[in-house]
Image: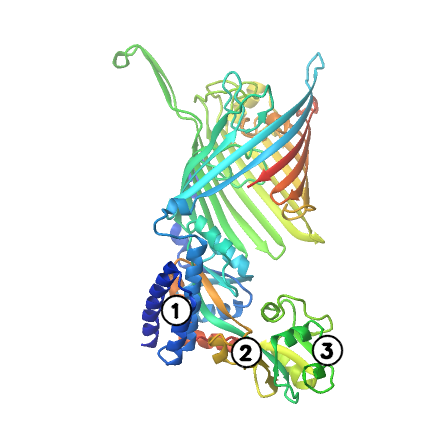
Amino acid sequence: MRAKLAKQLQKVVLTLTAVAFMSGTAFAEVDKLATILAEKGVITFGEAQRIITETKEDVKAKTATGKNEAVPLWVQTLKVRGDLRLRTQIDSSDANNAAETHTERVRVRERFRLGIESMPLEGLKVAFGLATGAMAGTGDKNPTSANHTFEAFNKVPIFLDYAYLEYAATDWMTVSGGKVRSGAQLWMPSQLIWKSDVNPDGLAFNFKKVLNSDVTFFANAGWYALGEKRETYYGVSNNATGSSATGMPTILIAQPGIDYKYEKFSAKVGVSLQQFYLRGKYVASNETGAFGSGRWFVNTSVQPYDYSLVNPSFEFKYKEVVSRFGVSLSGDYTTNVNDDFNKAKKTYNLKDEDKNGYLICLGFGDDRIGKLGTWQFKGAYRFLGKAAIPTGFGNTDAYGAMPGKGMEYSVTTGLLQNLSGVITYYDMTNLDGKAPAQVAQFDLVYRF
Amino acid sequence: MKKVFAVLAAMLFAGNVFASKIVLEGSTTVLPIAQRAAEEFMDSNSKADLTVRGGGSGVGINSLVSGTCDIAMASRSIRDTEIQAAASKGRKTKATVIAMDGIAVIVNRNNSISGLSKKQIADIYTGKITNWSEVGGKNESIVVVSRDSASGTYETFSELALNKQKVVGKALMQASNQAIVTTITNTPGAIGYVGIGYISNSIKAVKIDGISASNETVLTGKYPYSRPLFFYTNGDPKGMVKDFIDFLLSDDGQKIVGEEGFVPLQ
């Protein structure tokens, strides 16, 4: 009876509070009302305390979010994010040719990205991002880079970097459709297979469920389109003398995994299966992007081979091993188990190791980069066989994402809040240990 | 390969595997209440599957914001930035007060002091006052007794009484409320602090700024060393989450609150 009365009273008090809040009347009036009722024995002091505190919390929540029925939800949930990166890049490479060609390049580059997201309905997110990128004479729509290289004071083209709808079907599952953001397709501790600039086109399902106090299950699954289904008829279609057809080139990905945290230790492991349906299908080439000319062995418009990647990934971290500094060990391994590898092996005289790739990275330093004085060091070794992955989506800074092997190093340091400096160095060769190439990058990155 | 994908897809879409599991995360102060309440709730409800873990109020609220827990336990009010972070993900934080936390300052029962001001207590615990004669007592050194820094009671006392200043280095650090009561009982010049449920005849609870430590003064908000303990949920509690909160607010649940040394709402 008393609980029922308290509930009814709470409604009355909430209404009064809303009125008081709207009209600017002090909240103390509500406080006083509940206290008087408690003193008169209508409710207990505990119930009064609940009413007062919870009402304060409700008002605070409404104030903090600026909630106003007149303002639509999509405005209330509007969020802007982005970054600006200034980079000086030095490239040095030796071609594996008779002329012993050596090339040196120094480029000053800029990358600007701006993302906006909003929730027009509860559980439904709309997001899009704009980014700089290169527009070469033939129309470069490079998926792996948003860099603009300083040249002749050119204006800089802005591309649609991503645009998608995301629906939170339950607390533990989201479905995203469109040009989704990198990372939606799978969790990846390195850029061995996918560079972080690549935002794939398709449908992504992301799952995350806490199993117990230390263990979280996660899974990513998705379907992505690399091109169109194409049919060409010779002659009038209903009286055709012939036709050619190619199906839609697509990628299917599934990745279950476990995230484990215990005190200062954390471990995350996952295994992805990535099926590239490419054989006999048409993928448009572009200047330097996916499946374009110059890439090893998928070098025609109609692709000759399918790929089936089995890709275990891991990341182990231990915080505060030495003072505030922690260590990390992370990496990716991939092997192409598709039968088409055996056909390619004969055609191109490949070795068994050419179906494999791996990257192992050791890190040391602060857990997060923040103010001046925080820093992280990472050193990694990578190996990428000639038929390990469909080249074109990997890290183009590392030997142009081409098959090769060698080291990568990076040092990141905080300068100001949201401003950091990064030095990255790649030292790689081809798989025979020839044609060495080094890349040094000096970055200043501001995030907002 | 296609079969493997089909099996994985079936696993991923098998939503019923995850049915009716509730995760509580957050404040270590609230943790003992939640753990005992969860045990008793599961004993009487076979369908309930509750996981309770600590980490601190901030960790719990972050998990609620990111959707990895159902109830964030907090010994402080949610911050504006946390409310905004939740709103940006389409979540509305809803507070439920589940208990009050009050801390009594206690002295040896033979000590002539019966009341202190908030400033005097802060000065004693930060080492500025070292003799009872400085606060109207006899000429006797003050033995400062405190909970160890890992305890929620220490954290609460530091925040409410010391404005987050550190306890003086020579303080005797004790691992439990009961250990503090025992030390104060056996040490004539000692001063300590305990959860309000630990007040007994073997020690004397001093008035703070003239207010006695009692359930009533905590519930009326008059006692200065008190604060509400919260469960935060995403919107109004529903289903099993609501059932569990209702249980904790019931007579049986509030009995647990009292037994754990906190102030019940009833």
Q: Are marks 1 and 3 on the same chain?
A: yes
Would residue A433 be visible to someone looking at this image? yes
Q: Nearer the viewer, mark 1 or mark 2?
A: 2
x 44%, y 75%: residue: B265
The answer to whether A412 appears left or right of A114 in the picture is right
Q: Are marks 1 and 2 on the same chain?
A: yes
The foreground one among A385 and B147 is B147
- The subunit letter for the residue under badge 3 reads B
Give coordinates of residue A177: x percent, y percent.
Answer: 40, 37
Relative to A16, say whether A356 is above or below. Answer: above
Specify the amino acid type for callout 1: Asp
- The subunit letter for the residue under badge 1 reads B
Label 1 secondary element? helix
Q: Nearer the viewer, mark 1 or mark 3?
A: 3
Residue that numbered label 3 is attached to:
B130
Please tell me the numbered disc located at residue B246: 1
Please tell me the numbered disc located at residue B196: 2
